[in-house]
Image (cartoon, grey):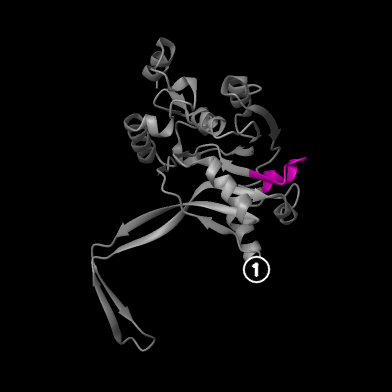
Amino acid sequence: MHAVILAGGRGQRLAPYTISFPKPLVPVDDMPILEIVFCQLAAAGCTSATLAVGHLAELIISFFGNGEKVGIDLQYVREDKPLGTVGPLAMLENLPESFLVMNGDVLTTLNYRQFFETHVAEGHEVTIACHRKTTRIDLGVVECDESFRVTGYREKPSLPYDVSMGVYAFSRSVLDLIPRGQYLDFPDLILKMISQGRNPKAYLPDAMWLDIGRIEDYANATSVFIEHRDKFLPPNACSTNDPPTDSRLAARGTR
């Protein structure tokens, strides 16, 4: 199993942490978030990964090197200019028939192996890992028809919706929709696929997923990770799941 990690963004919503520090290296408890991801991928049977890097790339390359530390063979491609959330894929060569694509700041308990194997077995071009969220509306919601006749009334309803985890499985055939050297975001790719009748598939696992896009999200994610560390990093996931060493405790204290 091969993974493409999109790690070139500036993480502007998490400023000031990301002004001089790439978001994939922002620590969650005592580990950079991307190190958590690599430990999970290695435990799921991922043997190689390509990182698309840009902002503060040298720090990421210096930290992870060739991947020996995390048990995955790592290669890097650099964005000379921002290419969006999916544009960097056009730079990659010799990709396997099926592969994972994911953001470098994903914090989830998703079973990557099961997700990948489902994508391959069902034969879709793109499969999107989703997480179900619910928003409670603290008002009465009035439902009307085209003539504004009231057809329903719901008092303080809870509305479910599915969001992308930032984890995808791709088949190589979809790469023909990604122009080389041009900016392209993932939503634009999906809309292009839908317009051509090449509809992606949603995958809704029973897994924890935490957004760390904003300062308040990051604080919550750290708290949840500490409480449920064994779910994010089961014993076979990574040697860094052992109790923090003196060096890791020191790093935690300097955040």
Quick check: 207 left or right of 22? Answer: left
Residue 109, image x and y in percent? 44, 39
Residue 238, image x and y in percent? 49, 24
In this rendering, does residue 185 appear at all? no
Q: Is residue 91 magenta?
A: yes
Task: Tell me which corner region of the image, top left, top right, bottom left or bottom right, holds residue 28.
Answer: top left
Going 69% across and 30% down the picture, which residue do you hit? 75
Residue 40, image x and y in percent? 51, 32
Say few, some or many: other residues with alpha carbon within 10 Å of mark 1 (under 14 / 14 to 19 / 20 or more). Answer: few
Residue 111, image x and y in percent? 49, 41
**Residue sitting nearer the eye, 79 or 76:** 76
Going 40% across and 54% down the picture, which residue do you hit? 132
**Residue sitting nearer the eye, 165 or 122:** 122
Q: Is residue 247 magenta?
A: no
Q: Quadrant location of the C terminus?
A: top left
Question: Up-down: is 165 above or below 157?
Answer: above
Quick check: 11 left or right of 137? Answer: right
Residue at the limit of the structure toward the front, as seen here: 121
Task: Tell me which corner region of the image, top left, top right, bottom left or bottom right, holds residue 218.
Answer: top left
The residue singled out by tag 1 in the image is 195
**Numbered disc 1: secondary structure:** helix
| Part of the protein shown in magenta | 87-99
Number of callouts: 1
Identified by mark 1, the residue type is Ser
